[in-house]
Image: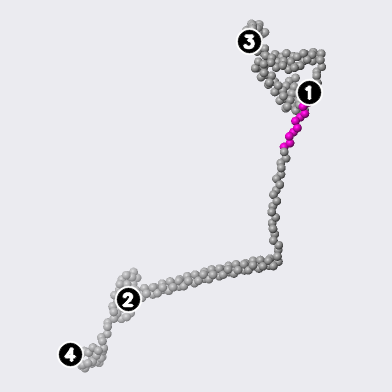
Amino acid sequence: MNKKQFVAALSAHYGGNRAAAEHALDAVTHVLAATLAAGDRVSLREFGSFDRRVVKARWVRNPRTGERIQAQATAVARFRPAALLKGIVSGKRDVPPGPPAVPPAPKVKPAPKVKETPKPRPKKVVPSKDPIKVAAAQKAAEKKAAAQKVAAQKVAAKKAAEKKAAIAKAAAEKAAEKEAAAKTAGKKASTQKVADPKGNSKPAKKGSSGKASAKSKAVKEPAKAAPADIVLPATETVGVDAGTTVPEAKKSKKRAQI
């Protein structure tokens, strides 16, 4: 019987729990080995005893070669069966009944989780619907919506008026600029004309804008007419009475030549 078979037979005394049987066997062998290694003796009543025996050094023979070899001193474990075990093995005695089987350990069930009782939520207090209050609230809401609509219309109208005024102002400024440009062009054209002695005006030649402007500044003024009260002296007038004015003297001179 090997260890596996021995554990299977031993598990019958542990309620079929092989793990518990194997653990018990390992614990027994461990205690025996540790006790014998320390030089102590283990005696089990009606079964036998385990002790440690020291073997002295001696000469031995190699069975293969037949050579004599000196063996060193060593210690060995020894088991001495009890009288009851000897009688059972020889058949003189029956095997006594075994100990009662150990009931399997009850499986410990995990403690059930205690469900937390949810806290009661506070009930919402729903106000009673009074028809008068409901109508008043509805009217107030409609009035507020109408006021907001009127305010939005006013803002839109104001923005449209401002936009229209800005367009009109821009058009007026543009017209004023055009009129000013036309006036400046007319002034330039009048300054570029040069007046001749007879009163005829000649346009300035191309490429001589600078000269034309200079000439326009230096236009000769027309000869001033002699004042009407100038009286020619008597020595310079021939056939003209004294006290006659210059224009009358010229006319009389022309008549005399004719």
Residue 146 drawn at (x, y percent) = 62, 68
| Residue appearing at x 70%, y 17% in the figure | 42
The quarter of the picture where the C terminus appears is bottom left
Q: Earlier in the sequence, mark 1 or mark 2?
A: 1
Secondary structure at badge 4 equals loop
Residue 41 drawn at (x, y percent) = 69, 15
Tell me the distance, in whole angstroms, between the alpha carbons under discs 1 and 2: 155 Å
Q: Which residue is mark 4?
A: 235
Residue 97 drawn at (x, y percent) = 80, 21
User: In the figure, is residue 184 to the left or right of 233?
Assistant: right
Q: Which mark is residue 221?
A: none
Q: Which residue is mark 3?
A: 73
Tell me the distance, in whole angstroms, between the alpha carbons under discs 4 and 1: 194 Å
Q: Do labels 2 and 4 touch, CB within 8 Å?
A: no
Q: Which residue is mark 1?
A: 99
Q: What's drawn in magenta, residue-wise?
A: 99-110
Q: Is residue 12 visible?
A: no
Q: Mark 2 belongs to which amino acid?
A: Val
Secondary structure at badge 1 equals loop
| Residue appearing at x 30%, y 74% in the figure | 217
Residue lying furthest left in this view?
235
